[in-house]
Image: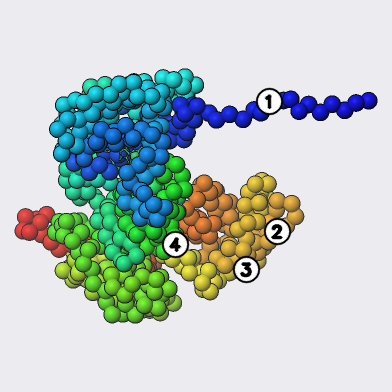
Amino acid sequence: MQVQINTELPDIIQLLPDNIANQIAAGEVIQRPSSAVKELLENAVDAGATEIKLIVQDAGKSLIQVTDDGKGMSETDARMAFERHATSKIRHIEDLFRIRTMGFRGEALASIAAVAQVILKTRRAEDETGTYIEIENSQVIAQEPIAARPGTSIAMKNLFFNVPARRNFLKSHAAEMRHIIDEFIRVALSFPDILFSLSNNGQEVFHLERGSLKQRIIQILGTHHNAKLVSVQENTDYLNIYGFAGKPETAKKTRGDQYFFVNNRFIRSAYLNHAVMSAFQQMIPADSFPLYVLFIDLDPSQLDINVHPTKQEIKFEDEKIVYAFVLAAVKHALAQFSITPTLDFDLDPEIQQLDAISKPLTDERKAELASSSLYKTFTQKNQAHLIDPAQHSELKHWNAMGSGPRGEATEQAMGNRQWTMSDQPVITQHSPLSIQEDATLAQLLNTYIIAPTNRGLILIQQQCAHERILYERYASAGEGKKIATQRSLFPVTLELSAPDAALLQDLLEDLNDLGYLVEPFGKDSFVIQGTPADIMAGNEKAAIENLLEQFKHFSSDKIFSRREKLIRSLSWQHAVKSGRPLNEREMKNLVTELFACAQPNMTAGGLPTYMELKKEYLEKMFGRG
Ligand SMILES: Nc1ncnc2c1ncn2[C@@H]1O[C@H](COP(=O)(O)OP(=O)(O)O)[C@@H](O)[C@H]1O
Ligand SMILES: [Mg+2]
């Protein structure tokens, strides 16, 4: 037998023709009309334009045209611009680490020329004539000098005309238009000093005059946001953050208007989003989303913007610092407002925003800060102000009424709070809220407690107030202050479905800290040996079942830890309900304990616990203000 080795097979590797290579590469950069919109808008911004016009037809499928008044291109540059890796923005590898422009890869125009018919008109102010170039399939098919205004106009027609598979892949006009608007908004938000307009099929969708960032946000996101924006601004040597966050009451049920820009580049970052959400924690309901438009500026060498071709992800040299900084800056901004819902006319939000910028630190707070590791990372001057929830309280000289078992905690909380008042210049215009020791309390509609104060009166919603008190008590249970357990004389057995049993099994340890003594008892069953001292005997079973239900309600929420959910569920469930009559002693305890809380003015879920009616308001009501 003979073994045949065929040495005659031809070599099979060939270089792809340029236009096919370009088409394939284009797939990365230009996925849909909106990707082209983004690239063209960014080029116009990089060219120093002060006016940028975007015109699309059929949601960009037939035409995308961007006209700018930027610096234009020479005749040679105009041709070069469509070559792959042709860029005027970087020359050396080191330039990659100091990028200040939006583009730098030199791929966008080459990609666009590979998948659409392109017409470029451009002129530099210093040139007498401009240049007209027509390109199809990456080939220049016409070029001539033209008369043109300084600047550049690029029109791309019939996107993917030569790649039918991609063209068929495009979504409906409405969906593609939505993507275009998203990209347009992102660029327009980052450059409020550039005029932007967008029209689709001859209809103007946006016309955004030059203005401040705040004006731009309002132009884009709606005038109802006026005065509902809190200014965020902190500077350090390492990074700066500025922008706006919506006041807690503007939080929406859908995740929408949330924008992060790093060195003016829109980024997506679940991590930094989490930092903002944490700053809002306890001010907004668990399932809602605050508005924010935040800009972080830092030395480009601290960034890697190279990680993804469409450049929406970004790597920070030190993510943790950025996280801590964002959290602190947003908390600080929110703390500028008395978030207690008072009926108040004279707190002008504009003035508060000015204060947000120049807020002094007290000596006490500085000493505290100096020992934190975060502080050490920042520079000595202009460090971020770290805010804790206690700072929101405007109650200073609270006189504990009656010395209950929690009197000690009350005093301690007062001590902690002392410095925060001098830290809030706006609020000190008003005398601090206090309630006399011998004040007579009254209950209204079995739901509200009326308490006279030094500056009017407050109405306390008993259920919300109690929920806040329990929340803070349970939250500190993990820090060594275990809640007392009352052992049941007749332990109750609980049989659960398999998934509920698994859930309860998971929670046993945390529940134990919170005063529940629950033990597994065979398959999917448990014995309740004891409950927190304040649960009435006989209710043990219902209490655990309700708790599991409530917990499941939170379970899709990734923001909160398991423990946080448990604490929220428990405090919600155990709070005294609206409609329950309270005696004088119960009311006093409730009021005392509420104002001993670190953050007395709302529930963990963001509902107000009390309302204040100030003297000035009452006077206005009676025509004497
Ligand atoms: N609107 C414009 N005005 C002036 N020059 C432009 C414009 N658009 C593109 N260019 C020039 O063409 C080059 C290539 O653009 P592009 O392919 O988007 O790459 P990049 O923006 O990454 O440099 C740019 O570097 C720039 O010099
Ligand atoms: Mg570009």
> Where is 414 relative to 256, above or below?
below
What numbered label is drawn on residue 341? Answer: none
Q: Position of residue 423 (x, y in %)?
A: 25, 72
> Rounded to the nearest whole Å, what is the CA distance between mark 3 and mark 2?
16 Å
What numbered label is drawn on residue 318? Answer: 4
Secondary structure state at the residue bearing disc 2 = strand
Is residue 240 or residue 505 the one in the foreground? 240
> Rounded to the nearest whole Å, what is the CA distance between mark 2 and mark 1?
73 Å
Residue lying at 60% horizontally and 65% vertically, measured from the top left: 512
Q: Residues within 10 Å of mark 4 (few under 14, many from 20)?
A: few
Q: Do the residues labelled 4 and 3 touch (CB within 8 Å)?
A: no
Amino acid residing under circle 2 = Pro
Amino acid residing under circle 1 = Pro
Question: Which of disc 1 and disc 2 is earlier in sequence?
Answer: 1
Residue lying at 53% horizontally and 62% vertically, measured from the top left: 535
Q: Determine if the C-beta at disc 2 is less than 8 A from ligand 1.
A: no
Q: Quadrant of residue 278?
A: bottom left
Q: Determine if residue 592 is in view.
A: no
Q: State ligand 2's quadrant.
A: top left
Q: Mark 1 points at which residue?
A: 10
Q: Residues within 10 Å of mark 1 (few under 14, many from 20)?
A: few
Please state if 419 lies on the left or on the right of 506 as rendered.
Answer: left
Q: Are marks 1 and 3 in contact (CB under 8 Å)?
A: no
Frontmost of labels 2 and 1 is 1
Q: Mark 3 points at which residue?
A: 487
> Rounded to the nearest whole Å, what is the CA distance between mark 1 and mark 3?
87 Å
What numbered label is drawn on residue 520? Answer: 2
Frontmost of labels 1 and 3 is 1
Frontmost of labels 3 and 2 is 2
